[in-house]
Image (tube, helix red, strand yellow):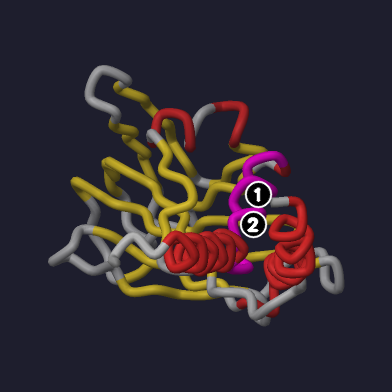
Amino acid sequence: MKKKLMCLIPVFILMIAFILLPSRTSNLYLRIYFEEIAGEHCTLYYSTDAMDVFCLGQHQTSEIDYDRKMVEFNLDPSLDGHITGLRLDFPNTEQLICISNVTISSGGIVKRQYNPCKFFADETIASSHNIAGISSVPSRARVYISTSPEESYLIFSDALCRQITDSYSHYRLTKAAFCVFLLACFLLARRKIFK
């Protein structure tokens, strides 16, 4: 029995190395779902450790998908570990926006799902511009944001920004699941349960 266990030690070491070794980083998707919104697009600005300002060179504009009632921002893997701040710009329209859900996903998995009342809470908003008000309705898990006709945006707190950007997938869970599957196949084959 001890010999069998000793034979498995190098396999375990290889598996751990396979799981922990750096691999390709997946894109990060921030999706915001609406019940009510008007306009064509929203914009997500980001600051980085190389350029710690919100500028035209560091942003992503996404069209609002009215069929799915959402807007999706796709942050490139090259930004992993470099984003220092996030700013969300709403359409240049005076309106009352109703937000129903916020999700962060990477590697094909939803890493975080936020109740909009918590995502847009006072402590998660560092500052705002041309926002007349933010009202939460916890019983319905809805947030209402009143915007102005010109440049309405929210800058998220450092803590929320870190939560979002820490969600980049490095496929460690996928690799771990693959190793467990191989190990289970190996152990079942050794027991010869199909004979």
Toward the left, the furthest residue is 67
Check if residue 165 falls in the magenta segment: yes
- Amino acid type at image mark 1: Cys
Which element carries disc 1, helix, strand or loop? helix
Q: Are marks 1 and 2 in contact (CB under 8 Å)?
A: yes
- Picture disc at residue 165: 2
Instruction: Please state which of residues 32 and 7 is positioned toward the viewer in this rendering.
Output: 7
The structure residue drawn at horizontal position 63% and vertical position 75%, both measured from the top left corner, is: 25
Question: x%, y% of residue 68?
Answer: 18, 62
Badge 2 element: helix
Residue at image position (56%, 27%) is 122
**Residue at 66% of width from left, 65% of height from top?**
46
CA gap, disc 1 to disc 2? 6 Å
Q: Is residue 164 left or right of residue 149?
A: right
Question: Residue 192 occupies which quadrant of the picture?
Answer: bottom left
Decide which of 177, 2 is in the foreground and name it: 2
Image coordinates of residue 135 in percent, x first then y, are: 37, 26
The C terminus - image quarter: bottom left
Q: In which quadrant of the rendered view does residue 109 lie?
A: bottom left
The residue indicated by pointer 1 is 161
The label nearer to you, 1 versus 2, is 2
**Boundaries of the magenta span:** 159-171
Q: Residue at x 66, y 54 (%)?
A: 166
Residue 33 place in picture, x, y as percent: 29, 52
The kind of residue tagged 2 is: Thr
Q: Is residue 95 above or below residue 57?
A: above
In this orientation, does residue 82 appear? Answer: no
Left or right: 42 as drawn, with respect to 87: left
Few, some or many C-alpha atoms within 10 Å of disc 2 (few <14, some 14-19, many ≥20)? many
